Image (cartoon, helix red, strand yellow):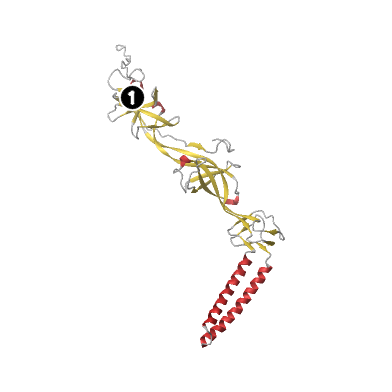
Amino acid sequence: MRAAGLPIPAADGGSAGGGPRFQGGGATRVIAQEVTTATAGERLVAIGTAQALRSVTLTSEVAGTLEDVTVSSGEWVDAGALIAQLNAEVQQLALARAELGLRDTRSRAARVAQLRDSGSATQVQIDDAELALNRAELDLRDAQLELRRRQITAPVSGWIGLIALEPGNQITPNTELVQLDDRSQLLVNFDVPERFVGLVSAGDALEASPLSRPSEVLTGRVRAIDARVDQGNRTLRIQGEIDNDGDRLRPGMAFRITMPLPGEDYPVVDPLAIQWDRGGAFVWALDDENRARRAGIEIVQRRDDAVLVRADLSAGDKVVLEGVQNLRPGAEVNIVALQPAPQPDIAQQTVDTTGPASGAPDI
């Protein structure tokens, strides 16, 4: 075989595959490639329900007869606007009496003050006049408060919901008059597994798609994170916010939330470098003196042109692509070609927390 110029099979029993060497003796000729690194990210998917940025159920503080409703269903109102008026004739009379009493008390207090200046008033008269004046002012404030309690105003700006009551209806403090929603932004609450604690922070970006319109993608951010994990289902409640431009969305809608999460950096090797035996997957790595060493690996993500692995490898290390059949630990190699490091397009792994009963399609 040597005379004919044919390669002679290696007699070393420690070789991985027993195949022929690239040459008859000396260092094994191999084709190698440098190791690079890439980040293996995750994409979290969850289902959440939207609520208005601010939502108020308007009720009356007191019982009475509804006299007037000054707004219409679906109307925008500013904070402080009058929504409804209860009958307040009794309170208006009380206010008039309080105003009259205050004027009379002030006149008396002024006369006592004149007598004090002339030295004709006693200290008891002076104290009684001041006390009467303070009491009259409090009576006026009380009458004004009772009158305001018959006026139902908007505590925040927002959209008026459906109004079911009409003037003449008798209402109590438990009667719901109308729902007021500020839906310029929507808040979406969703739950994630507890293993994501520390990976999600306020301000992180997210995407939201209404389940009724899955092709519509809205951008938002994480507004707040719950202070504790739910011990019952081991989940963490997260609140996101999205803009409601054009007022096309409504509180109560279900949204599919997608969030990219930070991942770890892993070595990247070509699939040709990966070998298998009874011990599992490994690659042949080269040290600074171009001697082979076996490096066990754990595959994290696999693509056609690159594989992310968990291994004792660093960026710039060299691994063998071709010529692995004749390698053994400590074997000297001759690198006949060095391939460029792989530049993988690693997709994010999807962690779907919606569950089979959520009604959302699987990714």
Task: Write the residue at 62% across / 76% down.
Answer: 101
Task: Write the residue at 62% across / 57% down.
Answer: 58
Q: Is residue 125 above or below residue 141?
A: below
Left or right side of 280 for 248 = right
Percent from the top left, x then y, of residue 51?
A: 57, 49
Q: Which quadrant does the C terminus fall into?
A: top right
Q: Which quadrant does the N terminus fall into?
A: top left
Which quadrant of the structure image shows residue 8? top left
Q: Is residue 156 above or below residue 125?
A: above
Q: Residues within 10 Å of mark 1 (few under 14, many from 20)?
A: many
Q: How many marks?
A: 1
Q: Is residue 266 in view? A: yes
Q: Is residue 306 in view? A: no
Which quadrant of the structure image shows residue 362? top right
Left or right side of 76 for 228 = left
Q: Which amino acid is tagged 1? A: Val
Which quadrant of the structure image shows residue 346? top left
Task: Write the residue at 27% across / 20% down.
Answer: 26
Q: Is residue 278 above or below residue 363?
A: above
Percent from the top left, x then y, of residue 255?
A: 57, 43
Q: Which residue is mark 1?
A: 30
Depth check: 102 or 244 in front? Answer: 102
Percent from the top left, x then y, of residue 115?
A: 54, 86
Q: Is residue 139 above or below residue 352?
A: below
Give the residue furthest to the front. 124
Left or right side of 330 for 45 = right
Percent from the top left, x then y, of residue 119?
A: 51, 87
Task: Write the residue at 60% across / 72% down.
Answer: 139
